[in-house]
Amino acid sequence: MKNWQAGLLAAGFIALTASGAGAQTLRVGLQEDPDLLDPDLARSFVGRIVFTSLCDKLVDLGPDLDFVPQLATEWSWSPDNKALTLKLRQGVTFHDGEPFNAEAVKFNIERSLTLPGSTRRSEIAAVTSVDVVDPYTVRLNLSEPFAPLLAALSDRAGMMISPKAAREAGENFSRTPVCSGPYKFVERIAQDRIVLEKFPQYWNASAYPLEGVTYLPIPDTTVRLANLQSGGLDIIERTAPADLPTVRGDSSLKLEQATSLGYQGITLNVGNGPRADQPLGKDPKVREAFELAIDRNIVNQVGFEGEHTVGNQPVAPTNPFYAKSVPVPERDVERAKKLLEEAGHGRVKVELMTPNAPDSLRVAEVIQALAGEAGFDVSVNATEFATGLDRQTRGDFEAFLIGWSGRADPDGNIHTFVSCKGGLNDGKYCNPKVDEHLNAARTTTDTATRKAEYAKAAELYLADRQRIYMYHQNWFWAMTAALEGFKPHPDGMIRLEGVSLKK
Amino acid sequence: MLAYMARRLAVSIPTLLLISMLVFSLQLLLPGDPALAIAGEERSPEVLAAIRERYHLNDPVPVQYWYWLTGVLSGDMGESIRSRMPVTELILSKLPVTIQLAVMAMIIALAIGIPAGIVSAVRKGTAWDMGANVVALSGISIPNFWLGIMLIMLVSVQWGLLPASGYANPLEDPLRNIQTMIMPAFVLGTGIAAIMMRHTRSAMLSSLRADYVRTARAKGLSERIVVLRHALRNALIPVVTLGTLQLGELLSGAVLTEQIFTIPGFGKLIVDAVFNRDYAVVQGVVLFTGTAFILMNLLADMLYFLLNPRLRA
């Protein structure tokens, strides 16, 4: 080979393989591509991760599930709990330079309530009107006391967008969202990336060392981890439990984790149409036998290398609202068999519907084996996820393996699923006494009273076993060792306050 | 020739209509409510109703088809149910990415497949031939997704030479563009190279046995000229046809490869749209793919026509 050819080839190779020196921009690997970047229309969990840096909320959620100030500095309930008054932070501007004030809050709350297709309306439906008390004080008037409102304001319903930008962009707001968060929107390429850059006028800008953040959706968990290992990403969310040994064994990486607000379990059809008419749907004793046949620790071990948190309630045992009076039951095959006998059954057939994802199938097979020992013939019916949801809504199921990503207020995990008229109560379970306690918990803002009401409700609905809660996913964030200041939160969000990349 | 092409084009319009009708009726067979799939956890009755209303999901399928068809005829393929992006814009933004990937893959395939095919035909029965056949066989049998993951693990994670995935606009960052595209192009290209090699080999073998090659040899021409100028030219005709058809397939989306390397191209668009039950995008993509296939077929016929003097007579 001639010298110049060799030189050219070498130069080309170096040029091709040299990786660009990155500025202080964080590259985040997401599991999916978010849907609409409009807090009032957004539907996906993954979108909330992007919103966390893009759109400030009235209230934020602390690592211990307490509410902390963000755009509202303080708040108070009226004596009858039918009005929430918020004092707003002064000197805040939206990314387009518009001022943030009480008028902006009024606009945002009203937009959430009236925008066609708003996904927020049901969360804050109790709000009847918004009063601008003074330029930095706003009062939300409610039709009835509704304690979970604060939790809604700590999520997308509390995200503030620029009224001017919202009016001008109309339907297209989600394509160029304008909020007041620490980072502002630069560009989005569908299925490829969402780019945000630092907003210098942010009220707390000095607490955000990073100059920007780029979100890259990479659905395959192995590829997401490979990108982190090869330096293409700085942090990834939802690392698969099976990949954790790799992360732990790599000295250039770090791992952080938090127990999620949600739950995974089995919804049983106890009253939705003719398919509820079978032993498991009709007889609480059979359901008790079914639960006693399952060992949650084995499910966790076989399904997820023991990396998730077992539990028996809609909130994890680590959650302040976990009812300690109803602990996780031990597996008891003998008692399960006896209960089946008492109920007058030999072997009981159960069709367990499950999403056709590998994780869910593994869990379903473990349940099949465990329940089989106690006298249940479980047939696993793997269904594509959207189809499963459809069948669940129509009552075309006996048992469905499904979860919920969780809400900050326990109400969001319980009320709509187990109250008689709950919108997501697809098993059509109904116990008026449970409703009484759940409604009582909504109307008071006193935490101790609320805990007591939720505990009383839990004692009842857990005994009825319309759902068998099994475990709570843990969020696993794998990141480069150079990343400093990351604090794991149970809501699964990535908050960038104090986060920096060491050079 | 022109009249023939015009006839072919005229026939393709009803074909496309038929394809689009088929796609619409297939939707009927798909279980699951798209509104539920799109709404996800936010599946309150009012949200579902709003989605159904906006995208005519409550209407009977023929009515939906009518909305879609009249839209398409006026150049509007509707908007994505998930992202509200215009389908035309989505397709047009993904297309250059996939075209680049397809062209790079095709270059790699030609650069490997044709020389390997020639060598193994000329040296039939030798170790060269055996070697090339083994390589071709593995090229055909190794699934792209496996080869892709192995390459990522080796080249990106172990050696740290290339980014594991992602994409950069060639106009903004040409270097990074090549860095991210080279591995997926290689994965795609090697698969096609194997097919090319097999076809080149058998076409070469039959041309090498042909009378005109014997004549050329009898004239005392060098073996190099005999092989490259006389035999190869004729052998290339079927290979070119194959190449254009493969290119059509590449354009319709290198589904798995784009998924593994997170290349935001056509294939990824299709997969995500199907998973999200994003009907508008699926329909647009199918229509577009159908058109691409028909055009590629047409192109293949034209090339065949140009290359083969016997057809022109």
Image: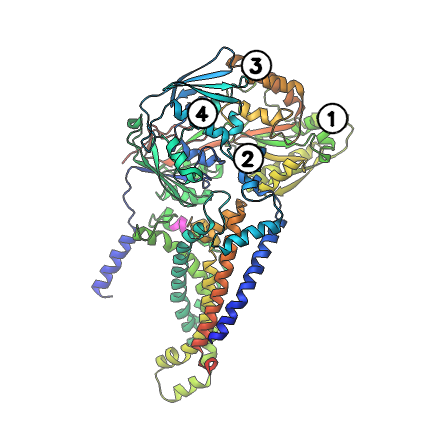
Question: Residue A71: image x %, image y %?
Answer: 38, 23
| Residue that label 1 marks | A338
| Residue that label 4 marks | A154
Residue A408 part of the magenta-drawn span: no
Identify which amino acid the numbered label 2 is placed on.
Answer: Val
Of helix, strand and loop, which one carries label 2? Answer: helix
Identify which amino acid the numbered label 4 is placed on.
Answer: Ser
* Chain under numbered label 1: A
Q: Could you confirm whether marks 3 and 1 are on the same chain? A: yes
Main secondary structure along the magenta-highlighted residues? helix
Identify which amino acid the numbered label 1 is placed on.
Answer: Lys
* Chain under numbered label 3: A
| Residue that label 3 marks | A452
Q: Nearer the viewer, residue B43 or A106?
A: A106
Of helix, strand and loop, which one carries label 3? Answer: helix
Mark 4 or 3, nearer chain start: 4
Q: CA distance from mark 3 to mark 2?
A: 33 Å
How packed mark 2 is, by other alpha carbons closer than 10 Å (few <14, some 14-19, many 20 or more), is: many
Q: Could you confirm whether marks 3 and 2 are on the same chain? A: no
